[in-house]
Amino acid sequence: MINLKFILNGKEVTVETEPSIRLLDLLRDKFNLTGTKEGCGVGECGACTVLMNGKAVNSCLILAAQIEGNEIVTIEGITNGNELHPIQKKFLKYGAVQCGFCSPAMVLSAFALLKENPNPTEEEIKDAIAGNLCRCTGYKQIIEAINESAKELTSH
Amino acid sequence: MIPSIEILIPKNLNEVLGILSNQDKNFKIIAGGTDVVTGLKQESNRFINTEVLVDINRIAEVKGIEKRNGKISIGAASTFTEIYTNPIVSSELPILKKAVATIGSLQIRNRATIAGNFVNNAPCADTVTALLVYNATIEIESTNSKREISLQEFLQGPYKTQLKKDEIVTRINIPVPPKTFVGDFYKLGRRQAVAISRITFAVLMELNGNKINEIKIAAGAVTPIGTRFPELEKYAAGKEANNDFIKSLASKLGEEIIKLTGLRWSSEYKLPVVQQMFYQMLKRITKK
Ligand SMILES: Cc1cc2nc3c(=O)[nH]c(=O)nc-3n(C[C@H](O)[C@H](O)[C@H](O)COP(=O)(O)OP(=O)(O)OC[C@H]3O[C@@H](n4cnc5c(N)ncnc54)[C@H](O)[C@@H]3O)c2cc1C
Ligand code: FES
Ligand code: FES
């Protein structure tokens, strides 16, 4: 067991954990942050995407001890209290959420993209979500929702 | 399940070397972990006996990309995203940049590192062909040795390299290619596709008018490991890069690949695909 200290959704946290459990399990089992999903468990589906130091990563491929001192943001960390993030609202508005299993990760990939590149082209949007599988929507609505989010976020 | 493993997070290279020099335990370096963690999960026998993982992501000596004495020096633990967005790579190493862009997904490229790619040395390690045509050399260190060898020499076979248990790859060095060289990277097929339907090629060449002064050719995924073709390169030097010649070069490359793999391909399909793809690529480079 180790005592792990890191920043989770803006707050410094300390937790006792096995060093080699996956970040995915740490978030779900120790912090009850179940918005982070397990699909494939081997880096293929992106359902487990979280942000580490601002970058989208697969939490199924990171081991707990590796995040010491790092900053982790999950889907639960981008809302403002009970108010959804603008990207989440656009996802709802444009029908980009069907079963919803891919949605938290998809929103985080969009969030990371728009932070770095507030005016992405359609190609850039596609590249940013190429690691997020969605079995329901066919992606068209998702790309539209991200595009509309970009417009809204840059208009302020 | 990932087995219970101790994880060390050293802060500098000396600490890493000290840890690796202790031969009592089964140590394994972890960088991006995209091969290590999936390997542990799938109980791959290359990782199964690991007792301690040594995380090298915070070691300044293996990070960063810079020009030093006419060479571009890439830290071994540079992520593909760091390489892709680096201005030196963009202007001097376009073939590497193109290879890196084809890897996995953004989430993978944000973690996966360049040394992890060729130390793992899967037949389909996509950066290998690009690094081979650039004549990359790699720096390897342990507590009592420091050596620099060509990547070609380092790679020994599928999933096999010259790396010893107490060693770490610290830098990848690439001589700055003269501006007169042109080239390209080509990849067909997804990683998950059946290995043999995948192809990667990298070519770097200098043309004088229509004459080939020098050419470097590498292929991967269709070959057991990423490979250069010195005989073919010698044969092509000094020749006119006309349509007939590049066609014959493509057909020779196909034959060489068959020799190398010893595979009895269903040649009606694979051989022509390899030859056609390589021909198209040469055509693009020489703009025929
Ligand atoms: C979903 C998915 C998609 C992928 N797609 C592609 C693809 O398209 N193309 C491709 O080529 N690969 C692909 N890969 C494979 C993998 O991402 C790459 O091989 C990657 O470069 C490995 O780097 P890493 O830092 O993650 O390695 P790690 O998993 O950290 O390490 C891999 C091996 O290298 C050793 N090692 C790492 N760094 C060093 C060092 N500095 N010195 C000595 N030893 C070291 C480790 O001990 C280990 O044996 C994919 C993987 C996944 C999970
Ligand atoms: S669960 Fe992590 S990528 Fe599928
Ligand atoms: S909405 Fe069902 S997987 Fe994307």
Image (cartoon, coloured by chain):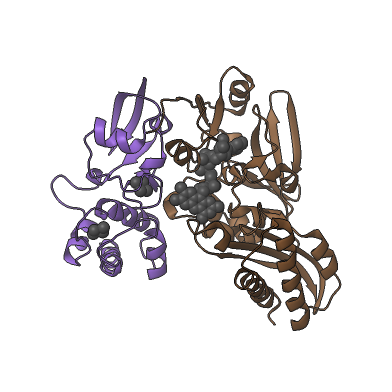
Q: Residue at x 70, y 68 (%)?
A: B254
Picture layout, residue B270 above or below residue A84 = below
Residue B40 or residue A35, whichever sits in front: B40
Residue found at the far right of this picture = B238
Quarter assignment of residue B87: bottom right
Chain A's colour?
A: purple
Quarter assignment of residue B232: bottom right
Q: Is residue B183 left or right of residue A133?
A: right
- What quarter of the picture does the C terminus of chain B occupy? bottom right
Residue B208 x %, y %: 82, 75
Chain B's colour?
A: brown
Residue B165 x %, y %: 64, 28
Residue B9 x %, y %: 49, 27
Q: Is residue B103 left or right of residue B278?
A: left
Residue B197 or residue B239, whichever sits in front: B197
Residue A1 x %, y %: 36, 19
Q: Is residue B109 visible?
A: no
Picture layout, residue A105 above or below residue B264 = above
- What quarter of the picture does the N terminus of chain B occupy? top left
Q: Is residue B52 visible?
A: yes
Q: Residue at x 47, y 56 (%)?
A: B192
Q: How many marks?
A: 0
Residue found at the far left of this picture = A82
Residue B266 or residue B5, whichever sits in front: B266
